Image: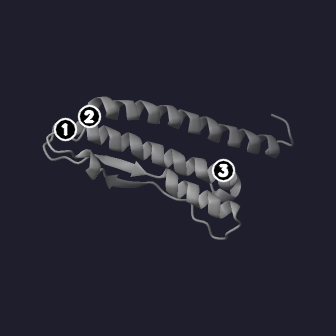
């Protein structure tokens, strides 16, 4: 799928799906390392960069690059004497992320249905 075929909306959904997929991997990694002393949990940064890219695109700027998710260490989570990974919070984040992923797939499916209808001269 290219940005030309799906447009900005499709490209944004694809980028968000990539971020959600990466979040699932990062969350599983955090849970797997929950008992490791000194482990600093990882997080995925994406939404602010996506918002900026979409604002640039709506402002008519050319050569807007769709943002990609980035992984960073959550040094704020490493509190003195406290576990840096809280299993209940990580599990909750994974469930929320899974729901968001499913919603994004629904959005992509809608985009593809619109393209299919256009390709079939308005017939399903």
Q: Judging from the image, what secondary structure is the residue with disc 1 in?
A: loop
Which of discs 3 and 1 lies nearer the camera? The answer is 1
The percent position of residue 124, horizontal first and vertical second, equals 80, 34
Query: How many callouts does the rendering have?
Result: 3
Q: CA distance from mark 2 to mark 1?
A: 7 Å
- Between 14 and 86, which is closer to the camera in this rendering? 86
Q: Is residue 51 above or below residue 106?
A: below
Q: Judging from the image, what secondary structure is the residue with disc 3 in?
A: helix
Q: Which residue is mark 1?
A: 83
Q: Which residue is mark 3?
A: 9
Its colouring scheme is: one colour
- Between 74 and 66, which is closer to the camera in this rendering? 74
For the point 46% across and 43% down, the residue is 20
Q: Are marks 2 and 1 in contact (CB under 8 Å)?
A: yes
The percent position of residue 65, horizontal first and vertical second, equals 57, 65
Q: Which residue is mark 2?
A: 86
Q: Classify mark 1: residues with Cα within 10 Å, few (<14), some (14-19) or many (20+).
A: some
- Is 116 positioned to the left or the right of 74 in the image? right
The percent position of residue 103, horizontal first and vertical second, equals 57, 34
Q: Judging from the image, what secondary structure is the residue with disc 2 in?
A: loop
């Amino acid at each position: 799928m290219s940005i030309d075929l799906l447009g900005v909306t499709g490209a944004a959904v694809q980028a968000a799906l990539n971020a959600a997929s990466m979040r699932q991997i990062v969350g599983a990694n955090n849970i797997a390392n929950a008992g490791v002393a000194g482990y600093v949990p990882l997080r995925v940064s994406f939404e602010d960069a996506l918002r900026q890219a979409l604002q640039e695109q709506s402002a008519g700027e050319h050569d807007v690059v769709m943002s990609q998710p980035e992984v960073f260490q959550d040094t704020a989570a490493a509190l003195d004497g406290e576990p840096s990974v809280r299993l209940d919070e990580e599990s909750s984040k994974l469930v929320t992320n899974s729901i968001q992923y499913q919603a994004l797939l629904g959005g992509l499916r809608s985009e593809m249905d619109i393209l299919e209808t256009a390709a079939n001269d308005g017939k399903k």
